[in-house]
Image (cartoon, rainbow, N blue to C red):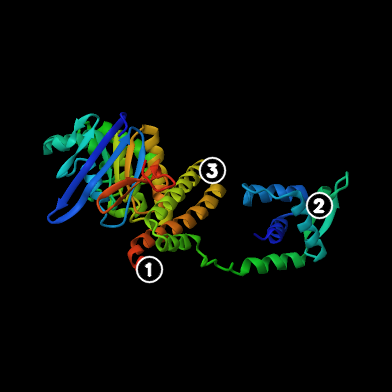
Amino acid sequence: MSIGQTFLGLLERQPRHGYDLKRVYDERFSPDRPLHHGQVYATLSRLLKHGLVMVDGTEPGGGPERKRYAITDAGIADVHAWLEVPEKPEPYLQNVLYTKVVLALMTGRSAEQILDVQRTEHLRLMRDLTKRKLDGDLTEQLICDHALFHLEADLRWLELTAARLDDLAARVA
Amino acid sequence: MTTDALLVGTDLHKAYGPTPALAGASLSLRAGEIVAVMGPSGSGKSTLLHCLAGIVAPDTGSVTYAGRAVDRMSDVERSALRRADFGFIFQFGQLVPELTCLENVALPLRLDGMKRRAAEARAADWLVQLEVSDVAHKLPGQISGGQGQRVAVARSLVTRPAVIFADEPTGALDSLNGEKVMQLLTTAARDTRAAVVLVTHEPRVAAYADREVVVRDGAARDLTRVDVAGRAA
């Protein structure tokens, strides 16, 4: 997750104090894992150093919290470039579930049970996320839906693997 | 099986000619509970739903609803039970094309003998709840698939059934419309304390249920009760 570029995007809209950046970031993008204060100010220091933001005001009291940050032209160009470039899709080729299934077949255990137990756990989490989504606002729904789609992809793989177990067992033997 | 179960199917077997569709499936449902029935295509999940709903009689095994033996009822008795206590949602809605959406939703009440004005007033309320009141006077062929399914959900709820049977209710819909239908269906079911038997192959749809039962090769297994060693409780 690119904290620096997210800060730049928030600052492009309006200048903000450090504490306000953290508040908006946590609310909109990371409600489950709020930023540490240290992360906030380390990020802002780096952005300042690279000329992507500047300090355009200070409240009385001192300390980094009281500085107000504004984006520079270089910062605008930086966030624009970041938004234009697609994220690298993660193919998840290293698959723990696949390893467990193969090992189960190699050691005479029931691979079907492993798939069933995993399926149960996935569905339990999906139920929890669905409840959370129903009670939440649009941001919550989008975040939960992202997780739900990933979990569903795992479940589709589990189903397909269950159907292929006989073939896989023959190859592993 | 729990003693407070509303609907219980026990050791159900059903074959169509030489093809076994159910081979010892069991499922119990409590009042107000939503159970997802999952499984690959051809596993028997729709046949399980049909047996539980009294649409077909199993070859062997029993189906009990509110203490009554459904599998031993006559066709007429099962038909009356379905009209009185059950609601249905199918993958393609199955609305009557010659009736308006309002008339479609009011139809179960009219078949029960309710006067037209009262039936359509109640139907109109349900169209509002399902957020499709704007299509009340349109024909099914004039509305989108998503709207049609919401009309079908309204129709299934209009008689305030004790159990709703939904067979792939989002199967013909895109993700957004599917989500909307599931949110509205489960909210309305919980508000009216209707139990739901939800057949689906989509995990995200099944995640709206309280628990899941997986059907494989005609047998059903409650996966929410599978423990770490993979043993069913």
Sequence-wise first label, 1 or 3: 3
Report the amino acid beneath label 3.
Gly
Q: Which residue is mark 2?
A: A68
Please state which of the two labelled residues, at mark 1 or mark 3, is closer to the viewer.
Answer: 1
Q: Position of residue B90 (x, y in %)?
A: 28, 49
- Identify the residue position indicated by label 3 in the image: A136
Q: Chain of mark 3?
A: A
Q: Are marks 1 and 2 in contact (CB under 8 Å)?
A: no
Q: Amino acid at mark 2?
A: Arg
Residue at 23% across, 38% down: B108
Kindly tell me whether residue A47 is visible in this rendering: yes
User: Which chain does the residue under circle 1 lie in?
Assistant: A
The quarter holding residue A171 reads bottom left
Circle nearer the N terminus (2, 3) = 2
Left or right: where does residue B71 sit relative to residue B8?
left
Quarter of the view holding residue A110: bottom left
How far apart marks 2 and 3 lie (CA) works out to: 32 Å
What's the distance in space between the residues labelled 1 and 3, CA to CA?
49 Å
- The answer to which of B163 and B14 lies nearer the viewer is B14
**Residue B185 position (above or below residue A78):** above
Residue A43 vs A33, above or below: the answer is below
Q: Quadrant of the N terminus of chain A?
A: bottom right
Give the image location of residue A81, x and y in percent.
67, 69
- Rate crowding at label 3 as few (under 14), some (14 to 19) or many (20 or more) other CA atoms within 10 Å: few
User: Which residue carries the number 1 mark?
Assistant: A173
Whether residue B57 is visible to the viewer of this picture, yes or no, is: no
The local crowd at label 2, few if under 14, some if 14 to 19, many if 20 or more residues have their Cα within 10 Å, is some
Q: Secondary structure at mark 3?
A: loop
Label 1's element?
loop
Report the Cα–Cα distance between label 1 and label 2: 66 Å
Chain bearing tag 2 is A
